[in-house]
Image (cartoon, grey):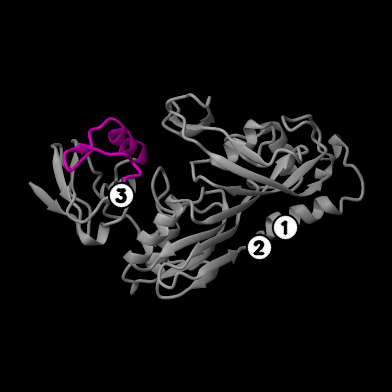
Amino acid sequence: MKLIIGGGPPPASAGVRFLTVGEESAGQRLDNFLIRTLKGVPKTHVYRIIRSGEVRVNKGRAAADDRVAAGDVVRLPPVRVAETAADARPAPAREFPVLFEDEHLLAIDKPAGTAVHGGSGVSFGVIEQLRQARPDAKLLELVHRLDRETSGILLVAKKRSALTKLQDQFRDRETGKTYLALVTGAWPAKLKVIDQPLHKYLQADGERRVKVVAKDDPDGMRSITLVKVQERLPLLHLPGEGRGGGGSEASLLEVTIKTGRTHQIRVHLAAQGHPIAGDDKYGDFEMNKALQKAGLKRMFLHAWRLQFDHPASGERIALQAPLPPELQKFVDHARHAPAPVRPDRL
């Protein structure tokens, strides 16, 4: 049996099924294709059946980042697709600050705390809210992703041709992606390149995590991060030594990634002993508590600049999203702190 994927997800099924990729899905990564198709199936399970080889494309094994083409036949093992609850509410319509828009693509300034898409306990994200706000749009698809707690530039394609060309640029490292990150401690000025393989794994509770591994580790993916110190800050003389070499100093970094691995910036910086301020997964937890009292309520990571070639004209586009008010306020406060703050005053 072949099922042509069109408007909606397939019904719940306990048997092996074969899906034929339609024109509207051509060019998508396999994981994204399955996540959108198998609504109700946890993303962790989707990745598990891909890794195990139970998912086949044209009778062969496939990786999560392989791209599907129109006419490809995808074999799925038995999975249960949750039925949509009768009282389930659609995502609320929401527009986001626009940095650039034409008939091919949309660039928005994503706020922290908003997922880019629904799944893994999140009912909806940026893309679902945009689709509700723009019901007449023929297509709105995420070009890339940002972590939920990361703010900044996010690209959305409005045409299938734009989606494919932009994703090719991200895959082939033809884009320029620079983030602003505040880390604890004094970042060494000479440490400008981090070239350490990363390995993605699941914890016992199914949560995704990433770690640095040895260069000869067969599961390691080469990951390259470039770091430039933009400014050093006193960090309000916070208490505690922390892993960054002292609680009294922080470094505002411009971080450019040459590879787009999951949690790459967060793990690479933390592995050097300078975790991102406010990072609840890889950070210095005691320092984070002190930072919260000092006014930092989120992870200090912001997708600041993005360069890419326009998918239609080929023109080089350079976008910049200023620091969100809450992060700018924290930096300004640190710059102008009149005197050290004693631990008992925090």
**CB within 8 Å, label 1 to label 2:** yes
- Up-down relation of residue 135 to residue 186 (above or below): below
Residue 130 screen position, x and y as percent:
42, 65
Residue picked out by circle 3: 67
- Tell me how far mark 1 sits from mark 2, CA to CA: 9 Å
Residue 230 screen position, x and y as percent:
75, 51
Horizontal side, residue 42 vs residue 92: left or right: left
- Up-down relation of residue 81 to residue 209 (above or below): below
Decide if residue 280 is in sight here.
Answer: no
> What is the magenta range?
43-67
Quick check: is 202 in the magenta stretch?
Answer: no
Residue 97, quarter of picture: bottom right
Horizontal side, residue 99 vs residue 277: left or right: left
Q: What secondary structure is marked by label 3?
A: loop
User: Residue at image x 81%, y 53%?
Assistant: 333
For the residues carrying marks 1 and 3, which lies nearer the camera in this image? 3
Quick check: is 53 in the magenta stretch?
Answer: yes
Residue 80, quarter of picture: top left
Horizontal side, residue 224 vs residue 72: left or right: right
Q: Earlier in the sequence, mark 1 or mark 3?
A: 3
Name the residue nearer the viewer: 39 or 174.
174
How many numbered dots are placed on residues in this image? 3
Q: Give the amino acid at mark 1.
A: Gln
Residue 143, quarter of picture: bottom left
